[in-house]
Image: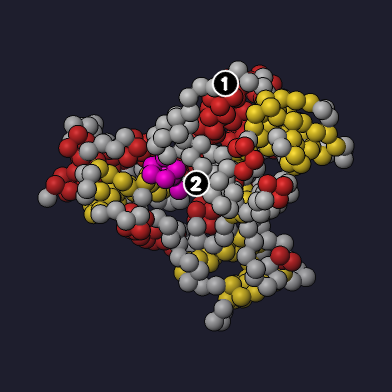
């Protein structure tokens, strides 16, 4: 392998790296992808797919129990072993043969090992057996190494064998008691899942529950978690964590009080996997987030593209939008930009151009699979104000929509839009309630397309569906 030359080297074979390499090959260039773990990355084995598999059975059971006729046909509780077995199938039993076969079919060369930049467009690869080889790229190197769970500096925590999202998602046995440190997406989704699977869950949310979503959405989730028996401690902060000789975890809280649990899950954020990539060669900080320009080229501390602009960073590693679908969106833009530059084609580096990731700043969709679900796109009201926009918000009770009341007895939820007063367009959308996930793409299109409210009146929602909330929001906004 030493001395091999290819058009593009991609470090990281998760969904982002796979999509970059696929666009490169589709554009007529050659690509080598380097991976030190499983091909398919975090999303395939420890995040998107297996987490939603853990949550789906409980969500389906809750839905059935909200319909009297269907509820009469259901007895008993969740089969935990069956839930975990289905989770295993969605994680491909942590075997990447299928993903490797896809790479081969797509014409992408896979090299197993740890990649490190050692010279312009040159990557040194240390294989699993310790052998070292080098590959040089004619055009570009793309960093798509993603992120890992970050452990906060709580005394004793690292020595208490804490779970991160990986251990939680791949669990083989549900603990009787689970303490979760962190009230963000991972923390609330895992609180939802493990509570439904029989664990007594305590959620420690120092900075609040889902602090980055609209407050009304977070309030619905807190109420639901508490009604399911989850102990939610908002504002509490662990001051020490220990695990005793019997395996019990003790979480001491600042200000007094403690929590005993069989396991503790840390869900307090992510850190970029850039610690040993050779970034110092380009004057970049090892272990830091990679800043990028409009076309995903890495830029240095001075804001310029270093060394001719051959280094790109796509996905979570650049910190723009830590979501798999946004990373894949960046991958398509970066891959096509590399092909354009390599072939002398025009580069569309203007907003909403083919080779930029404009939506990262204006139209990011997200679904949080708690009970109830939260679907959002674009900016929250607070985010829009922080961005300097002149906005107003409009909210509506989802339970008052005919389609929602048909969907489930006692349906509760809320939806809202953030309106840019200067452009009369929607810049943000949030809905919370059972099965609101399918509302999110309509919102994403409205925001990305900058559709004026006057035109949205002509996008008539079908009756009776939950989507009728769009009409109700427009009516409320017009009053």
Going 62% across and 28% down the picture, which residue do you hit?
Answer: 21
Provide residue 386's location: percent of width, then percent of height: 35, 58
Q: Is mark 1 on a helix, strand or loop?
A: helix
Estimate how packed mark 2 is, as few (under 14), some (14 to 19) or many (20 or more) residues with alpha carbons within 10 Å.
some
Residue at horizontal 72%, vertical 47%? 281
Residue 310 in view: yes
* Farthest-out residue, left: 479
Distance in Å between CA atoms under marks 2 and 1: 29 Å
Q: Would you name the residue on which mark 1 appears?
A: 343
Q: Give the range drawn in magenta.
A: 359-368
Side (left or right) of 174 relative to 362:
right
* Apparent side of residue 430 relative to residue 278 in the rendered image (left or right): left
Q: Position of residue 331 (x, y in %)?
A: 55, 34
Residue 256 to residue 128: above or below: below
Q: Name the residue under label 2.
A: 321
Point out the frontmost of discs 2 and 1.
Answer: 1
The one of 243 and 293 positioned closer to us in this rendering: 293
């Amino acid at each position: 392998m030493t001395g091999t030359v290819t058009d593009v080297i991609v470090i990281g074979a998760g969904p982002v790296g796979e999509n970059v390499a696929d666009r490169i090959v589709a554009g007529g260039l050659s690509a080598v992808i380097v991976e030190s773990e499983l091909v398919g990355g975090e999303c395939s084995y420890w995040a998107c797919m297996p987490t939603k598999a853990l949550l789906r059975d409980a969500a389906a059971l809750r839905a059935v129990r909200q319909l009297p006729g269907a509820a009469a046909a259901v007895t008993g509780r969740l089969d935990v072993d069956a839930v975990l077995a289905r989770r295993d199938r969605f994680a491909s039993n942590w075997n990447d043969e299928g993903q490797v076969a896809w790479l081969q079919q797509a014409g992408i060369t896979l090299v197993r090992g740890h990649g490190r930049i050692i010279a312009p467009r040159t990557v040194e690869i240390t294989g699993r057996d310790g052998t070292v080889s080098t590959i040089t790229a004619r055009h570009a190197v793309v960093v798509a190494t993603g992120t890992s769970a970050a452990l906060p500096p709580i005394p004793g925590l690292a020595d208490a064998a804490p779970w991160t999202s990986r251990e939680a998602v791949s669990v083989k046995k549900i603990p009787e008691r689970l303490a979760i440190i962190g009230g963000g997406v991972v923390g609330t989704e895992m609180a939802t899942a493990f509570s439904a699977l029989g664990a007594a869950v305590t959620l420690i949310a120092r900075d609040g529950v889902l602090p980055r979503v609209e407050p009304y959405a977070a309030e619905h989730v807190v109420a639901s978690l508490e009604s399911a028996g989850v102990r939610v401690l908002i504002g509490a902060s662990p001051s020490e964590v220990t695990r005793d000789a019997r395996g019990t975890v003790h979480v001491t809280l600042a200000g007094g009080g403690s929590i005993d649990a069989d396991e503790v899950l840390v869900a307090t954020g992510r850190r970029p996997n850039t610690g040993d990539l050779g970034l110092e060669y380009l004057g970049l900080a090892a272990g830091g987030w990679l800043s990028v320009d409009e076309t995903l080229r890495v830029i240095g501390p001075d804001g310029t593209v270093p060394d001719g602009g051959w280094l790109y960073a796509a996905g979570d590693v650049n910190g723009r939008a830590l979501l798999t679908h946004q990373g894949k969106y960046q991958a398509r833009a970066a891959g096509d930009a590399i092909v354009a530059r390599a072939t002398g084609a025009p580069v569309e580096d203007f907003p909403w151009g083919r080779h930029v990731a404009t939506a990262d700043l204006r139209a990011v969709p997200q679904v949080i699979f708690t009970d109830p679900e939260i679907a959002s796109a674009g900016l929250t009201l607070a985010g829009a104000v922080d961005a300097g926009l002149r906005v107003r918000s409009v909210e509506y009770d989802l339970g008052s929509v005919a389609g929602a009341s048909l969907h489930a007895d006692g349906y509760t939820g809320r939806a809202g839009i953030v309106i840019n007063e200067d452009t009369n367009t929607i810049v943000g959308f949030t809905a919370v309630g059972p099965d609101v996930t399918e509302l999110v793409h309509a919102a994403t299109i409205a925001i990305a397309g900058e559709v004026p409210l006057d035109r949205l009146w002509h996008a008539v929602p079908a009756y009776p569906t939950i989507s009728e909330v769009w009409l109700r929001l427009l009516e409320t906004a017009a009053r």
